[in-house]
């Protein structure tokens, strides 16, 4: 347990260090000219690293493998999922401007983190899925709370889906 906690703390520190180097504005995004002369926004190397790190955390949170970090699906144990959910939520909330203003990060928020959370929430309603442990369930709810609080205007459809799914879960429990 001690080794896992140390590894988690080190990974969390490294992730926060990478994100501390990324700025939400022009420092993170540069314009690359295309053949036609148009300027297409591209991420700086630090922003690209932060993005793939966030995407891997989201993959682990969803029980999938983390390609860039080099972990296969089997690595995503309950403890790893909880760590990844908490880290992704904290990183997104601490860097809200980045995730709202930079399209690549907004896309990752919507299509990686929110998608993983919706999958978690929807699985709670299905009878063919084994029950989620209390610690993992709390981590999912903490992450949903962080996304709703920080990004309800940026991801309104996902916010509505979270709330609708949570209400449906409560209704199922009450029946």
Image: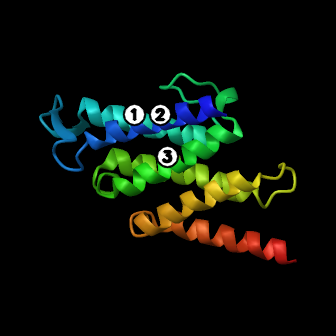
Image marks 3 and 1: residues in contact by CB distance under 8 Å: no
**Badge 2 local density, few (<14 within 10 Å), some, or many (20+)?**
some
Q: Secondary structure at mark 3?
A: helix
CA–CA distance in space, label 3 to label 1:
11 Å
Q: Which mark is drawn over residue 87?
A: 3
Q: Secondary structure at mark 1?
A: helix
Image marks 2 and 1: residues in contact by CB distance under 8 Å: yes
Q: Is residue 112 left or right of residue 51?
A: right
Give the vertical position of 64 relative to 136 (above or below).
above
Image marks 3 and 2: residues in contact by CB distance under 8 Å: yes
- Residue at 42% from the left image edge and 64% from the top image edge: 151
Q: Which residue is mark 1?
A: 14
Picture quadrant of residue 118: bottom right
CA–CA distance in space, label 2 to label 1:
5 Å
Toward the viewer: 157 or 131? Answer: 131
Q: Is residue 90 left or right of residue 160?
A: left
Mark yes or no: residue 92 visible.
yes
Q: Secondary structure at mark 2?
A: helix
Quarter of the C terminus within the rendering: bottom right
Q: Which mark is drawn over residue 11?
A: 2
Percent coordinates x, y for residue 17 in the rendering: 33, 38
């Amino acid at each position: 347990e001690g080794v896992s906690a140390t590894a988690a703390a080190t990974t969390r520190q490294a992730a926060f260090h990478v994100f501390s180097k990324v700025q939400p504005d022009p420092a993170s995004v540069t314009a690359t000219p295309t053949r036609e002369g148009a300027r297409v926004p591209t991420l700086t190397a630090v922003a690209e690293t932060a993005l793939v790190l966030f995407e891997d955390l989201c993959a682990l949170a969803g029980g999938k493998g983390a390609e860039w970090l080099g972990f296969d699906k089997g690595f995503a144990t309950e403890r790893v999922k909880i760590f990844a959910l908490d880290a992704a939520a904290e990183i997104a909330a601490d860097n809200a401007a980045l995730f709202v203003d930079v399209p690549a990060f907004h896309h990752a928020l919507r299509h990686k983190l929110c998608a993983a959370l919706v999958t978690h929430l929807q699985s709670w309603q299905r009878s063919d899925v084994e029950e989620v442990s209390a610690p993992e369930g709390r981590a999912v709810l903490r992450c949903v709370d962080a996304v709703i609080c920080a990004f309800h205007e940026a991801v309104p459809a996902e916010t509505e889906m979270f709330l609708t799914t949570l209400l449906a879960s409560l209704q199922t429990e009450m029946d």
